[in-house]
Image (cartoon, rainbow, N blue to C red):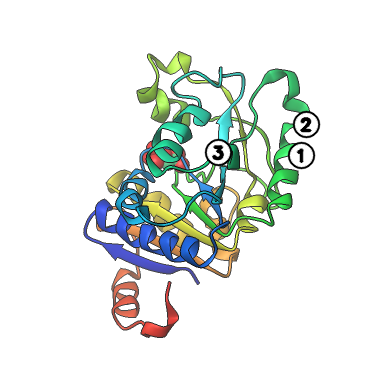
């Protein structure tokens, strides 16, 4: 099963994941990171900044999970812009080695295949950072997404558009379509870190970790992966039935195991 780590604050979660990324990049300077957007991964990127000072990141490669379809890549809320602003620039990564799915309408029909080919050419993702939507989505794989799915165009559910309206002038400005790594793509990454903070994520986390494996809650796909670390704060952990066991298991974890 996934390892569940319950931490006091989002900053603690950021530190934990950032430490693991630094270990990875130090051991493998051309590591392939799976990057997420949204509010959830921000503490990881913040914690990485001081930790990566002095680490050679010039060869680090990265793939974002998703992008809006039809959005101008220069739009401040395109995920290309978000990744550039929140990850590439502050961490000093080489922008040429960091990719986002191409949401341009002119090439959208083969953009999914192109992205899959790029990930495969990089040798796959070593460490994937994931948030979870209130709908239970990971990436933009909304309920009903196939566990075998690969990068493709999806239609956002209204709840997700409402959740993301805070980044736009109004909900009407949130694009309706996205291109997202599939659940099959995400499951092919070697180590998944699923993060969630706050009461609003408690139901989705409980479903992903303890609920039935079902495409109705796409985050439950993590139960099929052999190396998953779920890092949540107390509020996001509040609906986990076995929280006491997870705390006990983590507190008594053999040091040699690592994450
Ligand atoms: P959030 O989004 O991190 O902004 O809450 C998570 C997601 O939709 O996957």
Mark 3 burial class by Cα count in 10 Å: few <14, some 14-19, many 20+: many
Contact between labelled residues 2 and 1, with CB atoms less than 8 Å apart: yes
Q: Is mark 2 within 8 Å of ligand 1?
A: no
**Residue indicated by mark 2:** 110
Q: In this view, which residue lies farthest toward the left?
A: 8
* Quadrant in which ligand 1 is drawn: top left
- Up-down relation of residue 156 to residue 59 (above or below): above
Is the CB of mark 3 within 8 Å of ligand 1? Answer: yes
Q: Secondary structure at mark 2?
A: helix
Q: Which mark is residue 10?
A: none
According to the picture, the residue beneath numbered tag 1 turns out to be 113
Locate residue 258 relative to residue 180 in the image: left or right: left
Pointer 1 local density, CA inside 10 Å: few below 14, some 14–19, many at least 20: some
Q: Nearer the viewer, residue 128 or 226?
A: 128
Task: Pick whichever of labels 3 and 2 is earlier in the sequence.
Answer: 2
Question: Which residue is depicted at the point 77% across and 27% down?
Answer: 109
Q: Nearer the viewer, residue 48 or 149?
A: 48
Name the spot of residue 81 as percent of width and height, x first.
Answer: 48, 27
Mark closer to the observer (3, 1): 1
Q: Reading the chain from its start, which is encountered first: label 3 or label 1?
A: 1
- Residue for badge 3: 140
Along the viewing direction, whichever of 171 and 8 lies nearer the viewer: 8
Considering only vertical position in the picture, is 72 above or below 189? above
Whole-Å distance between the Cαs marked 3 and 1? 17 Å
Horizontal side of 234 relative to 97 (left or right) equals left
Real-space Cα distance between discs 3 and 2? 18 Å
Q: Quadrant of the C terminus?
A: bottom left
User: Which element is circle 3 on?
Assistant: loop
């Amino acid at each position: 099963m996934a390892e569940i780590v319950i931490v006091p604050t989002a900053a603690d979660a950021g530190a934990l994941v950032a430490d693991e990324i630094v270990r990875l990049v130090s051991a493998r300077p051309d590591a392939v990171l799976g990057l997420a957007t949204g509010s959830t991964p921000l503490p990881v990127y913040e914690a990485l900044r001081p930790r990566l000072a002095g680490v050679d990141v010039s060869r680090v490669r990265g793939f974002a999970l998703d992008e809006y379809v039809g959005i101008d890549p220069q739009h401040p809320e395109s995920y290309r812009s978000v990744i550039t602003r929140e990850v590439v620039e502050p961490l000093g990564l080489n922008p040429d080695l960091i990719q986002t799915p191409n949401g341009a309408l002119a090439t959208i029909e083969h953009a999914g295949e192109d992205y899959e080919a790029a990930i495969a050419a990089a040798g796959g993702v070593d460490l994937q950072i994931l948030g979870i939507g209130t709908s239970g989505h990971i990436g933009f794989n909304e309920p009903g997404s196939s566990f075998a799915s690969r990068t493709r165009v999806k239609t956002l559910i209204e709840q997700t558009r409402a959740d993301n309206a805070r980044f736009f002038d109004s909900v009407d400005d949130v694009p309706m379509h996205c291109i997202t790594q599939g659940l099959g793509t995400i499951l092919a990454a070697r180590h998944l870190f699923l993060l969630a903070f706050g009461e609003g994520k408690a139901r989705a986390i409980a479903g992903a970790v303890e609920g039935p494996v079902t495409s109705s809650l796409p985050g439950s796909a993590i139960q099929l992966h052999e190396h998953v670390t779920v890092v949540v704060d107390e509020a996001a952990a509040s609906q986990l039935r076995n929280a006491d066991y997870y705390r006990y298991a983590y507190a008594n974890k053999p040091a040699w195991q690592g994450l």
